[in-house]
Amino acid sequence: MVPRINVITLGVEDLKRSRIFYENLGFSPSSISNEHMAAFQAKNLVFCLYPHWLLAEDALVELKREGFRGITLAHNVTNKNDVQDVLEEASLAGAKIVKPAQDTFWGGHSGYFADPDGHLWEVAWNPHWLIGEDGMVHLPQ
């Protein structure tokens, strides 16, 4: 397997509500989006929203919606002050701030918000990672 991620799909309860939330955060839906799913180009990957019960059905797994799901999405920024700005933007779009912006044990600065379905997003500034002009994170070799 080539180590890459092409698509991230979040299972959502209310597709319309979630689509509006992510559009308010600046994601632009692709023309393939419809009343059954939403797809957004997000730099080098595709970000999708799909009803959670249909996603579970497709994967042949039991639907469980309680508590922490064991995964977070992350949005890295180029300077420390941007963390608070992005959290405020997310809050205005309807996110719940789960952890306010604060210094971290690893030398960075981060906070978390939850989307309307409880999916966690970390907003982080990491002084040890390079973010290129293209917005992509470039890890040291």
Image: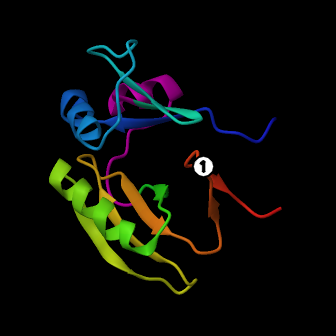
Residue 58: say if magenta.
yes
The spot of residue 131 in percent (x, y) is: 60, 58
Callout 1: 10 Å neighbours few (<14), some, many (20+)?
A: few
Specify whether 137 is left or right of 95.
Answer: right
Residue placed most toward the observer, 126 or 70: 126
Name the residue: 43% across, 25% down.
57
Specify whether 23 is left or right of 134.
Answer: left
SS type, badge 1:
loop
Residue 57: say if magenta.
yes
Q: Quadrant of residue 55?
A: top left
Specify whether 87 is left or right of 103.
Answer: left
Which quarter shows the N terminus?
A: top right
Q: Amino acid at mark 1?
A: Met
Which quarter shows the C terminus?
A: bottom right
In the rendered image, which residue does mark 1 sit on?
Answer: 136
Report the span colored magenta.
Answer: 49-68
Residue placed most toward the observer, 24 or 78: 78
Eyeballing the image, is 46 above or below 121?
A: above
The spot of residue 114 in percent (x, y) is: 29, 56
Eyeballing the image, is 8 above or below 119?
A: above
Give the mark count.
1
Q: Identify the coloring.
A: rainbow
Name the residue: 53% across, 87% down.
105
Q: Quadrant of residue 102?
A: bottom left
The outermost residue toward the front is: 133
Residue placed most toward the observer, 8 or 32: 32
Q: Quadrant of residue 19?
A: top left
Name the residue: 16% across, 54% down.
92
The spot of residue 82 in percent (x, y) is: 38, 66
